[in-house]
Amino acid sequence: MLPPLNSIISRLRLKHFRLLVALDDCGSLVKAAEQVALSQPGATKALQEIESALGAELFSRTNRGLEPTDLGYCVIRYARLITTDMIHLREEMVGILQGYGGRLSIGVIMGAVPLLTDMLSPWLEQRPGLSVQIVEDTSARLLRLLDDGRLDVAICRTSISEHPDLYEAVNIREEQLAIVANINHPLAEARNLQLSDLAACRWVVYSANMPMRLLLEREFHEAGLLFPLNLFETTSAFTTLSMLQRNPSMVALLSVDVAQFCTRFGMTRILPLRLQSRSEPYYLITRRDRTLSPNAALFVREVLADTASPHGDGMIPIVDSRSV
């Protein structure tokens, strides 16, 4: 039985986490002790303290050295996160004390990546000392990272959350969608298409129950078509583009921003088919119960000021790929 959380927190120290990371890296107590500047007896005692505090054996003692147990791998993963957080903490403190820089962590869903990079590029030119981390993932995953304090802000959707009231969410962009394919797709030169023309294609899609997947399923249903079964599922833009490049018969549903970016560089073609359903907007999301860092607060203010301006709505019309 695991000890109470308060007991674990009161007994573990940062030196314990450093030792866990070193043990995983070295696989040897002797080498790990040397890496963290402890004597071997000191490292042995520290490991005993860790296992006692957590109430579990974290390593198996073998002829080859120490091998993490399943619980050991779990604890090491969090030890690495804590160590990384301390590195980021020091970096941000140095930036604040020296009057420059700092750190900003932003989460973004795939379709909003071009929007975010357009926002960030001029902003970063004015802040050369700022360190920025961009995490691209699904809305569900980004909200979890925001909840855990690993992101300052996120550009995604709250509709997938069971507790949307936890967040401040401001609509910053109405998403438009486009169907894209390889430039050598059999229908790439078509002037007008119906969804039925693409029903037999293999589609690259998001996973089930995600907003863009649900929208595509609704399109098929309203057109009286069976949703394809031979799907290729991914949340990665790079994987999507790679599959389209290697498989000229495939098609994919992407945000217009991503589709136009790829088409502009000759990677894909936007097919002339207009969807009937409206996609859910992108939201700039923060936690209601958190105070933003100065950098995050400034970023939020500038994004909201830009999107509220007459030229800041960022709307891009769907166009035929041959005009891009």
Image (cartoon, helix red, strand yellow):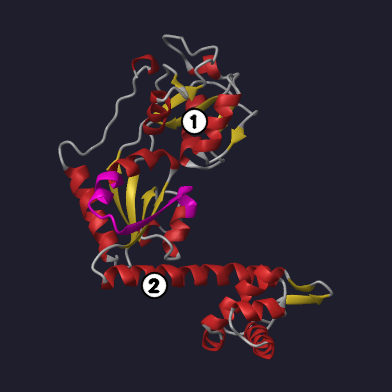
Image coords of residue 256 (percent x, y): 38, 30
Position above or below: 14 against 237: below
Image coords of residue 275 (percent x, y): 41, 24
Cβ atoms under marks 2 and 1 closer than 8 Å: no
Please state which amino acid type lies under the numbered disc 2. Answer: Arg
Please state which amino acid type lies under the numbered disc 1. Answer: Leu
From the viewer's perspective, tell me whether residue 113 is left or right of residue 309: right
Q: Secondary structure at mark 1?
A: helix
Pointer 1: residues within 10 angstroms few (<14), some, or many (20+)?
Answer: some
Image coords of residue 31 (percent x, y): 68, 76
From the viewer's perspective, tell me whether residue 32 is left or right of residue 67: left
**Residue ID for mark 2:** 90
Q: Write down the quadrant of residue 42 in the picture.
A: bottom right
Q: Nearer the viewer, mark 2 or mark 1?
A: 2
Q: Write down the quadrant of residue 21 in the picture.
A: bottom right
Residue 112 can be seen in this image: no
Q: Secondary structure at mark 2?
A: helix
Position above or below: 111 against 135: above
At x 63% / y 84%, what residue is drawn? 50
Magenta-drawn stretch contains 73: no
**Residue ID for mark 1:** 216
At x 70% / y 76%, what residue is drawn? 58
Q: Nearer the viewer, residue 74 or 47?
A: 47
